[in-house]
Amino acid sequence: MSLTNFIILFIVQLGIKDYSSHEFYVSTTSVDFILDKSEIQITSQFFVDDVENLIKFQNPNTTLAFEKRYSEKTNLILKDFIHKNFKISINKKMQEVKYLGYELRDDLLVVFYETKFSNSEIFNIEIFNSFLVNFIESQKNIVHLKFKNLKKSFLLTFLNKTLQYSFEK
């Protein structure tokens, strides 16, 4: 292999590294009921490159790169992303979701948000989660529901974006 071919191959590999993909497209969302505070703490985890690619696809002129330091621009984009793709209803009453912030953990983007509920008598919950499913066909969204001593997990996809669960009375 000539030196010129080696240099070209090296430069191409460097460029490909920036656009690396992974084999699985999955997010996880934990929905934890904190009954004594009448709140639900929600945490979602995504591969940071998947969210960056979605945002760049939707807004080609965006030069967003997630960074560990606080960014108001990133917070606004993530707040909008959460509000468009995550809805929660308790006893058939839609809850207001409040975005709290994000943090980076290696190649994971971790987003925090919460909602309050007024009635401690919770019988039904419905969650809509469409994170990345319209952008990545094979995207899977796992939702972990924690209520008192109950721990349930659900798998949501492009074809099934909503979960419904009824608690025993």
Image: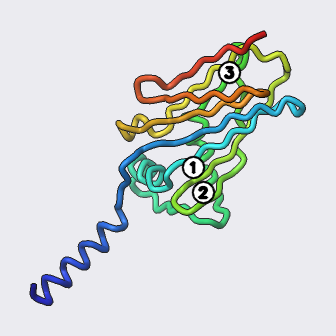
Q: Secondary structure at mark 2?
A: helix
Question: How much space separates mark 2 and mark 3, taking CA atoms?
Answer: 28 Å
Percent of width and height locating residue 113: 70, 42
State which tag comes first along the sequence, 1 or 3: 1
Percent of width and height locating residue 137: 35, 36
Residue situated in front as seen by the camera: 65 or 28:
28
Q: Which residue is mark 1?
A: 77
Residue at x 41% of width, y 57% of height: 61
Indicate left or right for 51 with 143 as reference.
left
Indicate left or right for 107 with 95 as reference.
left
Residue situated in front as seen by the camera: 149 or 155:
149
Residue at x 54% of width, y 55% of height: 108
CA neighbours of label 2 inside 10 A, class few (<14), some (14 to 19), many (20+): few
Q: Amino acid at mark 2?
A: Lys
Q: Amino acid at mark 1?
A: Ile
Does 49 appear above or below 86? below
Does 154 appear above or below 103? above
Q: Which residue is mark 3?
A: 89
Q: Which residue is mark 2?
A: 73
Q: Is there any visible trace of residue 115 in the rendered image?
A: no
Residue situated in front as seen by the camera: 161 or 150:
150
Q: Amino acid at mark 3?
A: Ser
Percent of width and height locating residue 122: 78, 17
